[in-house]
Image (cartoon, rainbow, N blue to C red):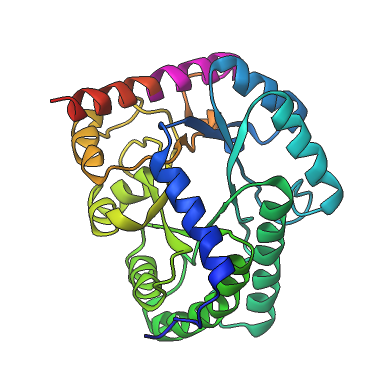
Amino acid sequence: MLGQYSSNDEADEKIRTVLVCYAAQVMNIGISTLFNLDLPLETVVPMVKKAGFDALSLMEIGEEGSVFLTTEERTGIKSMCNDYDITIDSLHAPLGSDIDVSSSDTRVRMYSVGVVKRAIDACIDIGCKIVCLHLSNDFEDPELDTRIKTAHESLHHLVPYARQHGVCIALENLFRQNSIVLFDHMLTQFQEKNIGVCYDSSHALIAGDLFTPLERYRERIMAVHISDNRGQTDDHILPYEGVIDWNAFARRFARINYAGTFLLEVDMQNSSFKEPTVFLDEAYKRAKKIISLLQSINNE
């Protein structure tokens, strides 16, 4: 099958260990550093711990200034999170107008592959096992066939590189129609154990169906980005601040038996809660509420 590679027993065993560990653990509650990118990690980590969170996902917009792409920063990040008993659940590969692994511009594409490889390297150093990756969300219909080809070329480099180091790549569902087609193509072409899905609830709602990617890829969901929106844009607001029916979500989500981190990818910018500690306390309470719904459903 296209996208398959020769067996590497040691690498595959690392991936099996990652997936078994996720399947066996009690669901942790995490949050992305996206909630306030102006705050340094030295401030964020103790705040997140105090609010009750178990895990953190590192998020950067653009490569410039990224704290996890530079080797010298990684030891400090790992040590700080260990001190506060916070798990680094995942890294989000940097986002930016010049970062696009499906670009038809060879220079941009290869630069972007390099950025993602450095994120994988950061996973190795920090002790994190998942890199969440956006394919492009912004291209026109005539580009689709080219985008499928170039995204495949990029993943052909990235998937075995990550696999060699026991790291998983979780492709994130986006919301424009071409992006959905591209996402589906890549998941069909690449069947390795270390490539799967990061399910984003807000993106799914904007795309028109909260549950399709959740149920279509239920066996391949490695990470989740949970947030709400007001129905039109990717607001990254807290659950229950927008239009998602979280009771209905819980009933469908419970069916997939996901046992990884229940991670909020939320942002203070569009929220009603403007003070960081209040925002984090509210975020944790709302995540706990959804998990309580899941537990109730599982006990029925």
Give the magenta range.
274-287
Observer able to see residue 126: yes
Quarter of the picture containing the N terminus is: bottom left
Q: Is residue 229 above or below residue 215?
A: above
User: Where does the image place residue 60, in percent across and percent down from the top left?
Assistant: 66, 47
Query: What residue is at 23 percent from the left and 49 percent from the top?
Result: 211
Does residue 133 appear in the picture of this structure?
A: no
Q: Position of residue 7 (x, y in %)?
A: 50, 78
Residue depicted at 61% across the width and 23% down the height: 48
Q: Position of residue 272 (x, y in %)?
A: 46, 20
Q: Give the image quarter of residue 227.
A: top left
- State the residue at coordinates (44%, 81%): 4
In x, y percent, where is residue 166? Answer: 59, 60
Does 205 sit above or below residue 220? Answer: above
Report if residue 279 lies within the magenta region: yes
Q: Quadrant of residue 142?
A: bottom left
Say left or right for 262 vs 112.
left
Residue 6, magenta (yes or no)? no
Furthest-right residue in this view? 72
* SS assignment for the magenta stretch, majority: helix
